[in-house]
Amino acid sequence: MKTSLTVFFEDPFWVGVFERVDDGKLSVCKVTFGAEPKDYDVWEFVLRHYDELFFSPAVETEMRQIADNPKRRLRNVRKQTERSGIGTKSQRVLQMQREEMKKERRQNSREQRDAEALRRLDMKQMKKKEKRRGH
């Protein structure tokens, strides 16, 4: 298992993206730090809260081959960042996680709305029966 952390500024906060690759599957977790964290702040966060992080569902990913030559490695990194930007796969996984949470939230609110409508209908029918009984 390989885990990496990328800290960057996403206006107006500093954000950390944890990427975890296990058996060719990528999981991502986004953490908002707020003010610019120092190295020791990040290290302390990792030590204390890594177990509590909520990672996204695993997605298949291709493993990158590491070039032996450092100059070639730099060239490849430059090409990849120009072509796709930094962390786009992670951002897609985070977007997928947000979409799943949105679906769950919509489904829950729909169920609550239906239950409330059913309750109101029952109350209305009961009131109608009470009126027909007479005084």
Image (spheres, grey):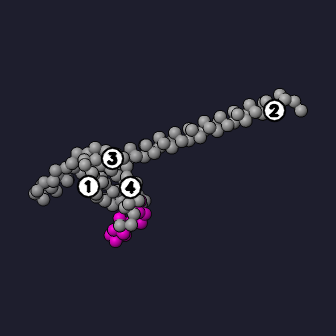
Which residue is more in the foreground, 83 or 46? Answer: 46
Q: Is residue 43 magenta?
A: yes
Of callouts 1 and 3, the N-terminal one? 1
Label number found at residue 58: 3
Which residue: 38% across, 55% down?
30
* Residue found at the very far front of the displayed protein: 133
Q: Which residues are magenta?
A: 31-46
Looking at the picture, which amino acid does disc 3 mark?
A: Ala
Of callouts 3 and 4, the N-terminal one? 4
Quarter holding residue 36: bottom left
Placement of the C terminus among the 4 image quadrants: top right
What residue is shown with label 1? 1
* Residue found at the very far left of the displayed protein: 69
What residue is shown with label 4? 30
Q: Secondary structure at mark 3?
A: loop
Label number found at residue 81: none
The CA distance from mark 2 to mark 4 is: 56 Å
What residue is shown with label 2? 130
Which residue is more in the foreground, 7 or 106? Answer: 106
| Pointer 2 with pointer 1, Cβ within 8 A | no
Circle 2 packing at 10 Å, graded few (<14), some (14-19), many (20+), is few
Looking at the picture, which amino acid does disc 1 mark?
A: Met
The CA distance from mark 2 to mark 1 is: 67 Å
Q: Position of residue 107 (x, y in %)?
A: 52, 39
The CA distance from mark 1 to mark 3 is: 13 Å
